[in-house]
């Protein structure tokens, strides 16, 4: 079987070193970083890296056995010279679109793009066009889509054990681009990636961050997402961090502490022999755990092998960033209902900040 040549562009925290930050987290199975994922995956060889910071790249090279000759400060040179099959774009969103578009236009066949997809809707539209025109497979790094415990949550919903899905809740959206992208993606997946009809949102710290068409920081967000199939998702800002709930007409399933533990309830008799029922707690099945990053990469490998679409795909990634900008549009209109597809969004995320310093040891 073919081994695919992989390269990482942006070899900082998520690109290469984040596993040093997640030691001891029970729900995060390493490797989480892209470089770690390509190294662990039996079907990929990590052959090259690119970053604007040669010092970070040097440590990346030592850690992942990528020689100096294959460390590039110009990602275009990497793509033209190394001709990788798969490229990761693990930069911040402000630097993602031009790299993804260049890769798609220059022979790269699969892209692992970090979240959030882009810094504006114009960029996201251009990425969608380039990726589809070139028949490129793209998965965005919203890892819970490939995380086995959330597969189990979806399996329970799809099996009808909680009846017909009515409501989804995400307990802490946090900031829209950084964490909202993760939560929106899981809510979309749990509802079978159904189209969204409208959103209504509030960004408690948003006003101070918006200056004309420029968004200077990543705002917190809360709101309502109405799906076309009638399911309503409530994305809250509570201290309950990464927790999710799916409520059907015959039960509910809740993932606590980012899937560390579970609560399954079903509509059962409250008193034996009486017709009165309620949502009673039943034993929740345990799920296996594995590296979601490796699963995401294996999904791209499967697409390259078979020509079938990956689990994520550019349309799902585009719908995700559209939700983020729809939340911003709703807030800017005083919390008005914003219909999707989103029209006329000109807002662009532009944070004036230096790249983060990766942690080189655990
Ligand atoms: N999926 C997850 O669980 C997860 C976790 C952490 C971060 N992330 C995402 O990963 C992305 C990167 O986050 P980070 O914390 O690693 O960022 P970072 O700031 O540490 O690193 C970004 C790197 O990209 C490089 N870069 C910027 N422009 C470039 C260019 N044109 N060519 C080559 N390199 C370039 C920078 O020099 C920097 O080293 C973000 O979008 C973030 O949201 C995802």
Image (cartoon, rainbow, N blue to C red):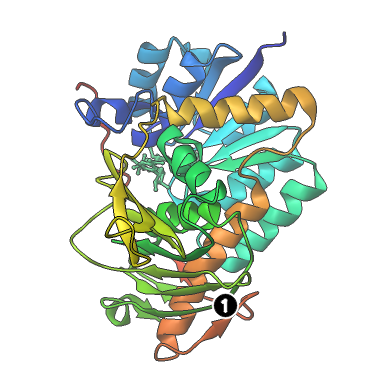
Q: Looking at the image, which residue is at 19% across and 26% down?
A: 24
Q: Is residue 272 above or below residue 342?
A: above
Q: Looking at the image, which residue is at 61% across and 56% down?
A: 193
Image quadrant occupied by the N terminus? top right
Q: Where does the image place residue 296, in percent across and percent down from the top left?
A: 54, 32
User: Which residue bears the numbered disc 1?
Assistant: 345
Among all residues in the image, which is located at the extreme front?
A: 273
In this rendered view, identify the residue nearer to me: 299 or 160. Answer: 160
- Answer with left or right where residue 259 lies relative to residue 71: left
Q: Is residue 361 above or below residue 116?
A: above
Q: Quadrant of ligand 1?
A: top left
In this rendered view, identify the residue nearer to me: 55 or 170. Answer: 170
* Residue 114 seen by the camera: no
- Answer with left or right where residue 339 lies relative to residue 212: right
Label 1 element class: loop
* Residue 48 seen by the camera: yes
Image quadrant occupied by the C terminus? top left
Q: Quadrant of residue 333?
A: bottom left
Q: Quadrant of residue 54?
A: top left
């Amino acid at each position: 079987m073919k081994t695919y040549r992989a390269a990482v562009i942006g070899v900082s925290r998520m690109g290469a070193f984040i596993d040093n930050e997640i030691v001891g987290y029970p729900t995060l199975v390493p490797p989480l970083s892209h470089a770690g994922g390509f190294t662990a995956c039996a079907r990929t060889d990590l052959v090259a890296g690119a970053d604007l910071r040669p010092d970070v790249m040097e440590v990346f090279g030592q850690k992942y056995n990528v020689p100096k000759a294959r460390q590039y400060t110009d990602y275009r040179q990497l793509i033209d010279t190394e001709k990788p099959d798969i490229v990761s774009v693990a930069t911040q969103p402000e630097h993602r679109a031009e790299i993804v578009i260049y890769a798609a236009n220059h022979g790269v066949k699969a892209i692992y793009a970090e979240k959030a997809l882009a810094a504006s809707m114009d960029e996201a539209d251009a990425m969608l066009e380039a990726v589809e025109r070139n028949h490129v497979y793209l998965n965005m790094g919203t890892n819970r889509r490939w995380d086995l415990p959330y597969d189990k949550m979806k399996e329970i919903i799809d099996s009808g054990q909680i009846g017909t899905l009515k409501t989804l809740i995400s307990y802490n959206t946090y900031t829209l681009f950084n964490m909202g992208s993760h939560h929106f993606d899981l809510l979309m997946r749990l509802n079978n990636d159904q189209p969204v009809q409208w959103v209504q949102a509030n960004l408690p710290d948003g006003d101070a961050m918006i200056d004309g068409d420029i968004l200077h920081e990543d705002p917190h967000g809360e709101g309502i997402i109405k799906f076309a199939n009638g399911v309503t998702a409530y994305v809250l800002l509570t201290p309950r961090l990464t927790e999710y709930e799916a409520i059907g007409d015959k039960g509910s399933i809740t993932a606590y502490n980012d899937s560390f533990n579970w609560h399954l309830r079903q509509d059962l008799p409250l008193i034996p022999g009486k017709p009165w029922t309620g949502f009673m707690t039943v034993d929740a099945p345990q799920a296996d755990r594995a590296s979601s990053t490796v699963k995401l990469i294996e999904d791209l490998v499967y697409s390259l092998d078979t020509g079938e679409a990956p689990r994520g795909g550019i349309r799902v990634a585009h719908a995700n960033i559209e939700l983020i900008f729809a939340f911003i549009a709703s807030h800017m209109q005083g919390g008005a209902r914003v219909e999707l597809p989103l029209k006329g969004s000109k807002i662009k995320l532009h944070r004036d900040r230096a790249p983060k310093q990766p942690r080189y040891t655990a």
